[in-house]
Image: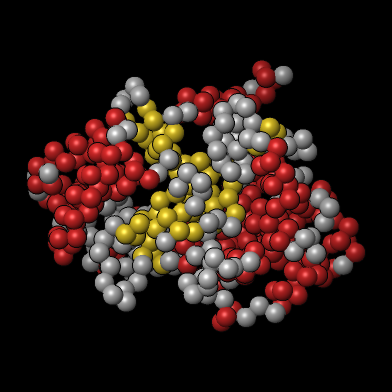
Amino acid sequence: MLDTPFVKTLQEDCRYVRCDFCHAERPFTLIPCEGCTCVMYCSQECLSKAFDQYHRYECGVMRVAYSVCGRFPATALRATATAISIFDGDLVALQNHLDALDESQVNGFTMDWRMATPKDVYSTMHMLTTNQERRGLVDRTYQILVAILLHKAMVERTELGPKCKASPKMDKLLFDLILRHAQTIRCNHQLLSFYEGQPEEKGFEHKLYGAACYPSVSMLNHSCASNVRRLILPDGRCAMIVIRPIGKDCQLFDSYGLHHLVEDRVLRQRVIRLLFNFQCSCEACTHNYRTFKELSFQYGGDFTLISHSQQEGIYKTLATRNRKLAFKIMRELQTDLNRKHSRYPSYDVCGKMRCYELSLCLVYKYVSENFLYCRKCTDILELQHLHPESLS
């Protein structure tokens, strides 16, 4: 299962390292947007595509969105700008499309994505859950405040201003879109990540570089013992990889960043209620599956029970960047896990599943060697915030 993001944004500390449009790594050679200098591109082609697809409606607002509102509201702003661009800036046409939208006819799982138009894709995006009825008063108030700030900035600083001032109906449409996208992004976002090469330590570290919203992947329900795993590919697409056998007519379950092998049930449920506004009742929460650390204590910390040599082999493979060997080990673990899946969540199966996921990442996931540049960028941004006069 492959999905292309409807919208994606970079983290602030990756601004000088990655192209804001294609997310390719081009450290310190990027071309800044002349209008806002907040986003940068690897080529004039990416700059032009970004302007046509969304940036013309966000250029004057993006810096405010990041600095005042944060990453997810900035992603919601871009989703709004993208939706408006799909209709060539015609707010009336966008309103008519939404008025005619039949929720029962929009299904991302049955849609033929090869034939889908940009308007079809946006229809799926627009129908993603907001969980508005489950949100507390403070949360709803915050979302409305964010929408007010972004709406005011878009009216005052973009070409949408005259259209909104001339029509109260279009002005309300813009506000409603921003608010809806802020809520859907909050519930349905996916964090973009890569593995950072660390030659000194002969290993890798998991790093985040942005956020995105995928129309079909976002429709998968959560489980703290998921049977599929998200894998963000170098081109920004999201691949769903099966990590546990799935029976016929069984549901695909994704993890929204919380897994029983890492966090205990109390923490998982608290975070899920806070971020996604629902009470998790998955198999891991129902049966209170143990964390991997607790499983290791159960067996006295004897790592030989889960083929310690295989774990070491995976880690050494990661350090040497040998994809052929990683692919071979991945296949061996896949066969072993299929044979022993009924033992889940035993220590042996969970340990091998972690190794399997690591091998998947090395084979398919992007591994960055530019970690030093990223750290320099982070230092520069911190210096700008703490001592802006030192850079003048």
Task: Using the image, determine if residue 225 lies above or below residue 70.
Answer: below
247 relative position to 211: left or right = left
Q: Nearer the viewer, residue 164 or 235?
A: 235
Name the spot of residue 156 as percent of width and height, x first: 83, 51
- Asked whether, in this view, residue 213 is left or right of residue 352, the answer is right
What residue is shown at x 44% (from left), y 49% (from top)? 232
Residue at 82%, 56% (x, y): give it: 160
Q: Quadrant of the N terminus?
A: bottom left
Q: Is 89 left, or right, of 361 in this rendering?
A: right
Position of the C terminus, as image quadrant, is: top right
Front in this rendered view, residue 265 or 40: 40
Question: In the shown orientation, is residue 133 left or right of residue 348?
Answer: right
Residue 149 at least partly seen: no
Position in image of residue 370 (x %, y %): 47, 28
Of residues 179 and 326, the one drawn nearer to the viewer in this rendering:
326
Work out whether 23 lies above or below 321: below
Q: Position of residue 195 (x, y in %)?
A: 40, 38
Image spot of residue 12 (x, y percent): 59, 38
Q: Looking at the rendering, which quadrant does residue 132 occupy?
A: bottom right
Residue at horizontal 9 percent and vertical 42 percent from the top: 304
Is residue 1 shown to the viewer in this render? yes
- Please name the colour scheme applied to the rendered image: secondary structure
Q: How many marks?
A: 0
Q: Residue at x 62, y 41 (%)?
A: 20
